[in-house]
């Protein structure tokens, strides 16, 4: 479930009930949120603390932007290019426009292909 930083109290309560219910077996809940939009006093943070207080394990995986070299390798792999020099200029432009945000990188490349660039 994406964008949990925007979830309302009722939705977070439903999630809390689902993951802490002792009758629930074999549930994997995967949620995403933007940590720069969630403070300690945010209702999402409160819900997480409540879940943790019930001894429910929570694994946090921080996803960051990708590097300029990662963008270049992604372009090489995506377009099946053998020569790294071929992707150098394009990867610099893509990185400059997207700051290495994975979603924006993919979307930007899709738009370039759609426009025949």
Image (spheres, rainbow, N blue to C red):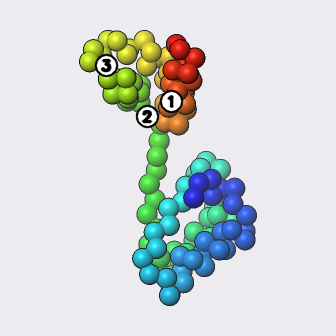
Is 57 rendered above or below residue 3?
below
Cα separation between marks 3 and 2: 20 Å
**Which percent across, then down, holds residue 66?**
43, 34
**Which percent across, then down, holds residue 74?**
38, 29
Could you tell me which residue is drawn at 33 percent across and 27 percent down? Answer: 77
Q: Are marks 1 and 3 in contact (CB under 8 Å)?
A: no
* Residue bearing mark 1: 105
Could you tell me which residue is drawn at 46 percent across and 59 percent down? Answer: 60
- Judged left or right of residue 8, residue 94 is left
- Judged left or right of residue 7, residue 90 is left
Is 64 rendered above or below residue 40?
above
Residue that lies at the very extreme toward the bottom in this rendered image:
23
Disc nearest the viewer among 1 and 2:
1
Find residue 81 and name its label. Answer: 3
Can residue 101 be spotted in the picture? no
Could you tell me which residue is drawn at 62 percent across and 53 percent down? Answer: 3
- Judged left or right of residue 3, residue 84 is left
Secondary-structure class at tag 1 = helix
In this view of the protein, which residue sits in the foreground, 89 or 58? 89
**Which percent across, then down, holds residue 1?**
57, 58
Secondary-structure class at tag 3 = loop
N-terminal of the pair, mark 3 or mark 2, is 2
* Residue bearing mark 2: 66
Q: Are marks 1 and 2 in contact (CB under 8 Å)?
A: yes
């Amino acid at each position: 479930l994406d964008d949990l930083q925007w979830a309302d109290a009722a939705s977070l309560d439903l999630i809390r009930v689902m993951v802490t219910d002792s009758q629930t077996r074999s549930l994997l809940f995967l949620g995403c949120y933007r940590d720069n939009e969630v403070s300690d006093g945010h209702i999402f943070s409160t819900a997480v603390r409540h879940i943790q207080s019930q001894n429910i394990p929570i694994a946090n995986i921080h996803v960051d932007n990708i590097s300029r070299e990662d963008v270049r390798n992604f372009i090489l792999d995506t377009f099946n290019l053998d020569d790294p020099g071929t992707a150098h200029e394009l990867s610099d432009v893509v990185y400059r426009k997207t700051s290495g945000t994975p979603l924006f990188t993919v979307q930007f490349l899709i738009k370039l292909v759609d426009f025949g660039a």
